[in-house]
């Protein structure tokens, strides 16, 4: 397999770490993103020791800060002229009560939508230099739990619930994946594909003490899901790895995958118009950080 340059966000734990470790075993250059430099360095050393691959790098950024995302993209470009695979894996579960970032954006939609949207836009030029670039967006089947979107209140200033904030952010993440795939085709860019996926429920990623704070119903739902439907980080990473490297996924774009197969997105609230509304909203949010 030809060696690729691969950037994975949220790669210091959980699915992201499992993804990074397996891709390192395959001999790729892997850049792991994390929020904490000491933790990222520890994970890097662990992966090098376990895989024998010393082509492991780290980048540090807070995905709750679009300024930080911009800085990370700039740092990547200072080190690398080309990017073959971008795996937008980082995610954040929302708080019980609405919180905003230092830049004034709702936290859940920032980490789960605005940040990966911005990072992708900032790295499109280096992705375009790859003969076959791939963008892999990690969403979740929880997108199907989204309530009817209110496009006049995308950041939940009027009506916030933690479950809906997360579900809608992940739903919109799938929509912008589809929209980007269409835009790339319209621009005649054939060497970049973009797909989204559901990795599975990972029990190790759930902090049950925090889930309990959100209410008995949510706590019991999460606990039951973790007990009966959860999978391992390694199994959860399989679809990301498949979309990043598999020859079978070479020319597929704009699709949603579950267990390495194309799956159906919940289309209850989907229209092309709604997809464009979300895309334009995200573009308007990140525009100041693109210059």
Image: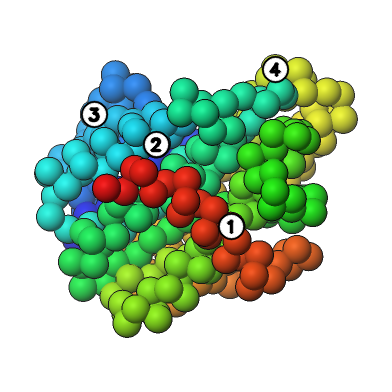
Of the pair 37 and 249, the residue shown nearer to us: 37
Q: Which residue is mark 1?
A: 278
Camera-near label (4 vs 1) is: 1
The answer to whether residue 181 is above or below residue 117 is: below
Do the numbered discs 4 and 1 sit on residues whose CB atoms are within 8 Å? no
For marks 2 and 1, give the CA distance: 18 Å
Whichever of callouts 4 and 1 sits on the residue coming sooner in the sequence is: 4
How many angstroms separate mark 3 from mark 2 (CA)? 28 Å
Residue shown at 61% from the left, 65% from the top: 275
Q: Nearer the viewer, mark 2 or mark 4?
A: 2
Quadrant holding the N terminus: bottom left
Gap between marks 2 and 4, in whole Å?
Answer: 29 Å
> Upstream in the sequence, badge 3 or badge 2?
3
State the separation of the CA atoms marked 4 and 3.
30 Å
- On the image, numbered disc 3 is attached to which residue? 45
Q: Nearer the viewer, residue 83 or 70?
A: 70
Q: Is residue 195 visible?
A: yes
What's the residue at 34%, 33% (across, down)? 67
Number of residue marks:
4
Quadrant housing residue 10: top left
Disc 2 to disc 1: CB gap under 8 Å: no
Tell me where residue 63 appears, x and y as whole percent: 43, 34
Q: Residue at x 38, y 74 (%)?
A: 184
Disc on the earlier residue, 4 or 3: 3
Q: Quadrant of residue 268?
A: bottom right
The numbered disc on residue 209 is 4
Q: Nearer the viewer, residue 123 or 7?
A: 123
Q: Give the residue pinned by disc 2.
A: 66
How far is the residue under mark 3 from the one under mark 1?
Answer: 40 Å
């Amino acid at each position: 397999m030809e060696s690729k340059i691969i950037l994975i966000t949220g790669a210091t734990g959980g699915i992201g770490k499992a993804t990074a470790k397996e891709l390192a075993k395959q001999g790729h250059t892997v850049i792991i993103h994390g929020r904490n430099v000491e933790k990222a360095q520890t994970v890097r050393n662990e992966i090098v020791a376990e895989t024998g691959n010393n082509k492991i790098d780290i980048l540090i950024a807070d995905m709750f800060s679009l300024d930080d995302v911009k800085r990370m993209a700039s740092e990547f470009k200072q080190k690398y002229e080309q990017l073959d695979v971008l795996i937008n894996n980082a995610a954040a579960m929302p708080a019980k009560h609405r919180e905003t970032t230092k830049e004034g954006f709702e936290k859940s939609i920032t980490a789960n939508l605005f940040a990966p949207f911005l990072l992708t836009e900032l790295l499109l030029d280096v992705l375009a230099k790859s003969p076959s670039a791939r963008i892999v967006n990690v969403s979740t089947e929880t997108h199907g739990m989204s309530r009817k979107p209110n496009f006049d209140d995308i950041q939940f200033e009027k009506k916030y619930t933690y479950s809906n904030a997360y579900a809608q952010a992940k739903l919109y993440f799938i929509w912008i994946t589809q929209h980007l795939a269409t835009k790339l085709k319209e621009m005649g860019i054939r060497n970049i594909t973009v797909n989204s996926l559901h990795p599975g429920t990972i029990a190790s990623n759930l902090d049950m003490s925090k889930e309990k704070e959100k209410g008995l119903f949510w706590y019991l739902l999460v606990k039951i899901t973790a007990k009966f439907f959860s999978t391992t980080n390694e199994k959860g990473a399989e679809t990301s790895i498949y979309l990043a490297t598999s020859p079978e996924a070479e020319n597929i774009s704009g699709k949603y995958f579950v267990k390495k197969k194309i799956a159906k997105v919940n289309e209850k609230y989907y229209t092309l118009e709604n997809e464009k509304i979300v895309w334009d909203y995200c573009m308007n949010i990140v525009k100041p950080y693109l210059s």
